[in-house]
Image (spheres, rainbow, N blue to C red):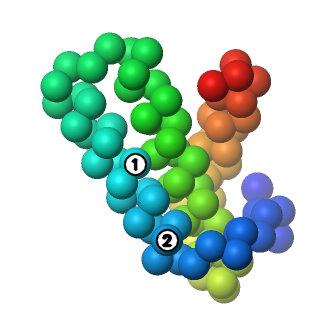
Amino acid sequence: MTTSAVPAPTTTSLSQVFDDWQRAGAALRTAESRGACDDEVLPLAEAVLRTRVAVLRDRIAAGWQPSDEMMRDLEVDTQLMLEADARGT
């Protein structure tokens, strides 16, 4: 995936996108620490994935140049999101 192929972010501010990512991560860690079942953890993990991708896309749209490794990670994360969408979650 090239930087030009990364969709532009929504009009949400970076601080909001970043806060969403932080909240999603906290919810996932909390669920995992109390031994939540997979049915509860999976949607939380997907929320972390979606919000992390949103943060990265926002930064790329703002001119940030991520490393090749980070771009590969973004590509993998995006593919995982597409698979989750195909499952209907």
Q: Residue furthest right?
A: 5
- Picture disc at residue 16: 2
At which x and y percent is residue 82?
72, 34
Relative side of 84 to 30, left or right:
right
Name the kind of residue labelled 1 in the image.
Ala
- Quarter of the figure with the N terminus: bottom right
At which x and y percent is residue 73?
56, 50
Relative side of 35 to 46, left or right:
left
Q: Residue furthest bottom?
A: 63
- Using the image, determine if residue 36 lies above or below residue 57: above
**Residue placed most toward the observer, 70 or 32:** 32
**Residue for point 63% across, 25% down:** 89
Say which quarter of the image contains residue 2: bottom right
- Can you identify the residue that label 1 sits on? 24
Q: Indicate the secondary structure of the residue bearing disc 2.
A: helix
At which x and y percent is residue 85?
71, 30
